[in-house]
Image (cartoon, coloured by chain):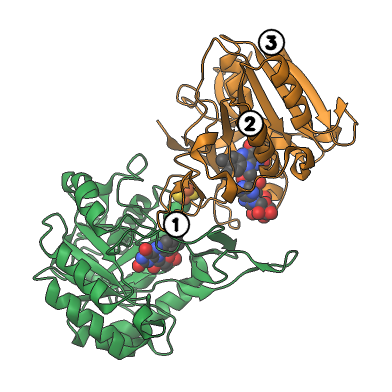
Chain colours: A orange, B green
Amino acid sequence: MMKNYKTRILSNQEIAPDYYRMKILAPGFGQHARPGQFVMFRVQRSMPPLLRRPFGVFRTGFLPADCDGMPEKEYLEILYKVVGHGTAIMRELHSGDAVEVLGPLGRGFEPGDPQREKILVGGGIGLVPLFMLAEDRVKESPVRLLMGGRTRDDILVVTEFERLGVETYVSTDDGSLGEEGFVTQMLERKLRKYPDAEVYCCGPLPMISAVNTICAAQNVPLQVSLEALMACGVGACLGCVVKGAGHTEEHPRYLCTCKAGPVFHAAELDWHALGTPAADSCEGCKS
Amino acid sequence: MSNGTMHKQPNLAVEIAGIKLRNPVMPASGTFGYGEEYTPYLDVETIGAIVTKGLSLKPKAGNPTPRIAETVSGMINAIGLQNIGIDAFITDKTEFLRRVNTPVIVNFFGNTREEYGEVARRLADVPDVAGVELNISCPNVKQGGIVFGTDPAAAAGVVSLVRKNLGSKPLIVKLTPNVTDITVIARAAEEAGADAISCINTLTGMAIDVKTRKPRIANRIGGLSGPAIRPVAVRMVHQVVQAVKIPVIGIGGIMTAMDALEFLIVGATAVQVGTANFIDPGVMADIVAGIERFCREEGIADIHELIGSLR
Ligand SMILES: Cc1cc2nc3c(=O)[nH]c(=O)nc-3n(C[C@H](O)[C@H](O)[C@H](O)COP(=O)(O)OP(=O)(O)OC[C@H]3O[C@@H](n4cnc5c(N)ncnc54)[C@H](O)[C@@H]3O)c2cc1C
Ligand SMILES: Cc1cc2nc3c(=O)[nH]c(=O)nc-3n(C[C@H](O)[C@H](O)[C@H](O)COP(=O)(O)O)c2cc1C
Ligand code: FES
């Protein structure tokens, strides 16, 4: 059940320049959260920013009981990049600060066919919603993570995926970590090796589009997680819509990213409206 | 407070155009979906009424994205009145609304006088609709796009047709603030048959991304809402209350009980909460509780002692 947790921060830690991970006390959150869902985050009693900010659920878990007899604490963890006003305020927050999180929200990833390989493609901060998916899928199927970023600083928490038993492959645009080049090039190679795989993707839109182009050409099932500007996160404001497959001026098909998504099957979306760059000229992988 | 009246439950019930509300707090149209979206977070039986998203004769697609932009203490939106259309609403959405013990006010709009009239006709006999709220902040496509609510004659024309087609259902007319003198429009609506006035709708605004030099929303201009507009809204409600005899519903930037009280004190009989729902889905219940607490602390037994009590 989604709810508005009026709670506090357990920790807020910089993990790379401008990237932070924040643990938030959230009793009962984990049993409801599914891979790919998100929360709407608000710094309590602060204005600005006025609106909440959406963040993917990175993971949920328990902090062990303290030796001084404090019980174990259930937390939800987000991983964020500082890009503007709201995230700049978030980076200043400390353990104990009061915050509100609304969630878990939206439609997450569908598990897919356990018999088939899983290839997860993440770009930069787009890695976030893939962690819980990996954690869940690795129990049934081989899971591989292809992780792309501009430089080594954009490659986050890959070792945590490895600890789950996920095979990880890294590429950076400048070659500072892993292979030099785009994550889409790795995807093409992996699909030649595992043509039966299912693909799950989150990252900057141009990267997602390029991944869609590759998967569509080979009839590979693809689920993508999209971002949109959001005010409410619950389907009330209609600010976050994307065009669905078959959208026309006469028969518009707008889908709420917050409610029908953020995860969509590729076939549900109007890729022409989203923008479909050629796979070999993917500026966006530079996220 | 050691006051003896403190433990007595103050009476918060008000009546708008014959609609009995358990308290004066309701959502503003377009910020609460069709009523169901917020049920996980808010018991709709704690608020005075439900006000639906704006409906039109035909379904409406809405505008391209981006549709929203946050600005200082507010947001600009150009959703474009996306809605499922009046017929789909009546067949699909009234089922939920029938089950809840809270009056339902249906907000609607049109782009011609005839469209407004036709929607009113279709709503006249729907038993689950306690009343309607007429949004006249829309352009008249038959008259060069002039906004109905900015011209007293055009406003009166729509209101009188809707009044006629609605039968006995209560009619609230929602005013746009984008006019020189809002009292002129308020009086025109009252004379044409409005049972109540609600104000204000959003103020037109614009925000620019200086790096790309493009407007931050696709529609270029949009409606500003949120705390940024509250002083303007309080002033306008104050003026409208003086100009008309029918009840007024105050809207604009209400985030807390104290904000709502400002509107009641200048004479609003009830208030609507819009943008604040996005930030805190339980906010309306908190506002009701806050008004009640204020009444107790001030020794007020009935909310009517507060309404219009401006000194
Ligand atoms: C479902 C979903 C999940 C997300 N998950 C994560 C996550 O796990 N980690 C993370 O770091 N970020 C995530 N984001 C993006 C995050 O919401 C934005 O980066 C954040 O809202 C920016 O807030 P700000 O106040 O710092 O930026 P602002 O000052 O508001 O804007 C700065 C820049 O960020 C862009 N921006 C603002 N809001 C959004 C948004 N909602 N989506 C995309 N870009 C935006 C603006 O266009 C602008 O260019 C997610 C977004 C969505 C919709
Ligand atoms: C996203 C959004 C959608 C809205 N849609 C409608 C609508 O369909 N009909 C209407 O009469 N007003 C609509 N409004 C205006 C609000 O009902 C309200 O008048 C305005 O937002 C001011 O109140 P606030 O500052 O509390 O939000 C909308 C406002 C917002 C922010
Ligand atoms: S963010 Fe409001 S409808 Fe999706």
Q: Is residue B299 visible?
A: no
Judging from the image, mark 1 belongs to the subunit labelled B
Q: Earlier in the sequence, mark 3 or mark 2?
A: 3
Q: Mark 2: few, some, or many residues within 10 Å (few <14, many ≥20)? A: few
Q: Is residue B92 visible?
A: yes
Query: Picture coordinates of residue B156 (x, y %)?
Result: 25, 86
Of tags 1 and 3, the one toward the viewer is: 3
What amino acid is found at the position of numbered circle 1 in the picture?
Ala
- Alpha carbon of mark 1 to alpha carbon of mark 3: how far? 44 Å
User: Which residue is outermost to the front?
Assistant: A217
What amino acid is found at the position of numbered circle 2 in the picture?
Ala
Secondary structure under tag 3 reads loop
In-front residue for pair A101/B98: B98
Query: Picture coordinates of residue B132 (x, y %)?
Result: 21, 66
Of tags 3 and 2, the one toward the viewer is: 2
**Residue for badge 2:** A217
Where B87 sits versus A147, above or below? below
**Residue for badge 3:** A165
In-front residue for pair A182/B172: A182
Which of the 4 quarters of the picture holds residue B173? bottom left
Secondary structure under tag 2 reads helix
User: Do the residues at pointers 1 and 2 share their chain?
Assistant: no
**Residue for badge 1:** B276
Judging from the image, mark 2 belongs to the subunit labelled A
Q: Is residue B63 left or right of residue A138?
A: left
Q: Quadrant of the N terminus of chain B?
A: bottom left
What amino acid is found at the position of numbered circle 3 in the picture?
Gly
- Alpha carbon of mark 3 to alpha carbon of mark 2: how far? 30 Å
